[in-house]
Image (tube, rainbow, N blue to C red):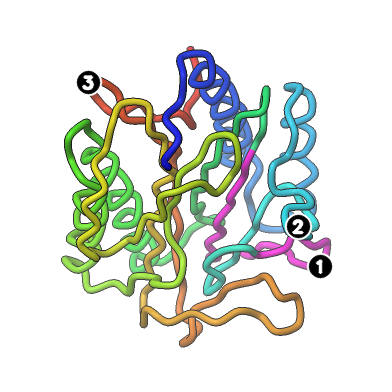
Amino acid sequence: MINRKSREETKRMRHAGHIVALVHQKMREVIEPGISTLELDNIAMEIIKENRAIPTFLGYQGFPASICASINEEVVHGIPSKDRILKEGDIISIDVGATYGGMVGDGAWTYPVGKISAELQKLLATTEEALFAGIAQMKQGNVLDDVSSAIERVANREKFGIVRQYGGHGVGHTMHEDPFLFNYSVGDKTVLKTGMAIAIEPMLNLGVDEVVVNEQDGWTVSTADKKPSAHFEHSVMVTDGEPLILTQLIP
């Protein structure tokens, strides 16, 4: 059964999402050539803990950090390291989760490192557009495939690859709840109802759809053709009116 959230649970999810948004606000400030992904992880950890939350990713199925830091052709699940130093022209996807009061906020964003190529700018802009196209479909009475199809239409328009093996998911008491959300149409007729919360996260590639998992670390997912990938994610709740983005700053 898909768990719909109570008013109190929603309040705690919004606070968890606010903490995620605080981390991303700081990432925008500090990401620049010369910083290591371990430094980014330490910054994120500090923000999460000073806001009395738990880093959701740390220890999840053995994951060793509080953020996923994925550079260029890395799609998701990149492990922070002092040896991964950002360079001018890179892009980096930062995925972060925070648990507050037993509820989870989960959000990702892909950032330019210094000045990036026009091709990469288009990839980032299109993936962000796909995210918000999906969010716009998170309305009571729509079905899950409306969200998937909206993402797919944006990706297909620009002829970008769509990651098939990974996608969005329900979110709330745990990071991964039902339903799974594909970033392309599969005909899922699950009806969206008030109180349902889903992490919508398009992952689009400059090249092919296919991805591979690093055999050495068992985590890092990269594009099969080594072309860059972008990843944008918000946790979003269906309401009686417009979709509620949970992973944004609370005024």
Q: Residue at x 62, y 41 (%)?
A: 97
Residue 40 visible: no
Q: Which contiguous range is marked in magenta?
A: 78-97
- The residue pinned by badge 1 equals 83
Q: In this view, does 230 lie above or below 144?
A: below
Q: Which residue is drawn at 37% across and 26% down?
A: 195
Tag 1 near tag 2, CB within 8 Å: yes
Residue 67 point in image, percent of width and height: 68, 50
Is 81 covered by the magenta stretch?
Answer: yes
Q: What element carries label 2?
A: loop
* Residue 42: quadrant of the picture: top right
Q: In this view, does 75 lie above or below 181?
A: below
Q: Which residue is drawn at 55% across and 49% down?
A: 176
Mark identifier at residue 180: none
Residue 25 point in image, percent of width and height: 57, 33
Local packing at callout 3 (Cα closer than 10 Å; few below 14, some 14-19, many 20+) is few
Q: Is mark 3 on a helix, strand or loop?
A: loop
Amino acid type shown at disc 1? Asp
- The residue pinned by badge 3 equals 241
Q: Which residue lies furthest to the bottom in this view?
A: 225
- The residue pinned by badge 2 equals 36
